[in-house]
Image (cartoon, rainbow, N blue to C red):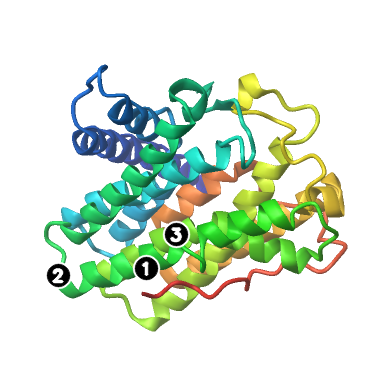
Amino acid sequence: MGAQVIQSGAMTGLQQELGLLKATFEERLRQVMGEADPADLLQSAMREAALGAGKRMRPLLMMLLARDLGCHPAGMLDAACAVELVHAASLILDDMPCMDDAMLRRGRPTIHVRFGEDVAILAAISLLSRAFGLVASAPGVPADARARMSSTLANAIGTKGLAMGQYQDLRAGRDQRSTDDIAVTNELKTGMLFDVAVNMATVIAESGDSVVLPLKRFARAAGQAFQIRDDLQDGPGNDSAVTGKDVGLDAGKATIVLTLGVEEAQRQLAFLVQESDRHLVGALGEQAATRLFIRALFADKAAPVSAPRVAPVAVRGAAFVTG
């Protein structure tokens, strides 16, 4: 009973902290995106993509982790905004007709549907450009740290990260592939921004290897878990009115869910959530706010009914981006 009260109190405190962090983040993101100008379709598309009702999971993870590492520079907020802008740009491109051809994102028409394909492409490019500008000028962050973060971001976007992951998803996604091959694509396409969030926090905090290495493993496991959860939400029985985006777009693709089946994918997901928690405890201890955040994010996936029946999804994948 006492442990439950402590846990409940910790979660209440976390919810309050998250509320404050998110409000601070949203205000800074609005400042970064500038005032609305209905006559400027490009700016409007950028604002729609960046300021839409997203979970802000990556920037919140980054800011919580920085706090757990004892780091509170003003530049962390701008770096977190940069990660969100990269994520927003990737969603614009992922939804394009030549990619997933999605009609709905975050409960609203996708950017290319609302503003046209030409504006959507230019908006994605502009968001990436603004993200690099934020990192390069992050206040209170030493120049060498800003350079390392810029390099990390560049690697994560290109052929070692998001672009290659999307390419593999599109070109090899409908072929028969091993779960290890699928995991590599998932890490490149989805897990890479988890890596970036963790990497930037550790760079600014000047963390040592005893912290950095388990956090790398945490980022990989959490990224894989998030992608499997996303794939499960894309399957039959899910409603776009609930998920806020199109469902069924993965039909025919070689995902963990379609390769192993729903039941086994759920076991794999639970295993990865446990792995991510284990690595977080190794890096930060049991009382870290980041740990509570991740446990809440995957609240219904923390305790599998049974262990995976096949070899757990690989969490090696692409090399962690160190810049």
Q: CA distance from mark 2 to mark 3?
A: 23 Å
| Local SS, label 1 | helix
Label 2 with label 3: CB-CB less than 8 Å: no
Residue 152 got which mark? 1
Furthest toward the left, the residue is 140
Instruction: Identify the mark nearer the N-term, 2 or 3.
Output: 2
Q: Quadrant of residue 147?
A: bottom left
Assess disc 3: are there few (<14), some (14-19) or many (≥20) residues with their C-alpha within 10 Å of its C-alpha.
many
Q: Is residue 155 above or below residue 50?
A: below
| Local SS, label 2 | loop
The residue carrying mark 2 is 142
Q: Quadrant of the C terminus?
A: bottom left
Instruction: Identify the mark nearer the N-term, 1 or 2.
Output: 2
Q: Quadrant of the N terminus?
A: top right
- Taking the image as shown, residue 162 lies to the left or right of residue 147, namely right
Instruction: Identify the mark nearer the N-term, 1 or 3.
Output: 1
**Which amino acid, by three-letter code, is at mark 2?**
Pro
Q: Quadrant of residue 171?
A: bottom right
Assess disc 1: are there few (<14), some (14-19) or many (≥20) residues with their C-alpha within 10 Å of its C-alpha.
many
The residue carrying mark 3 is 157
Residue 123 in sight? yes
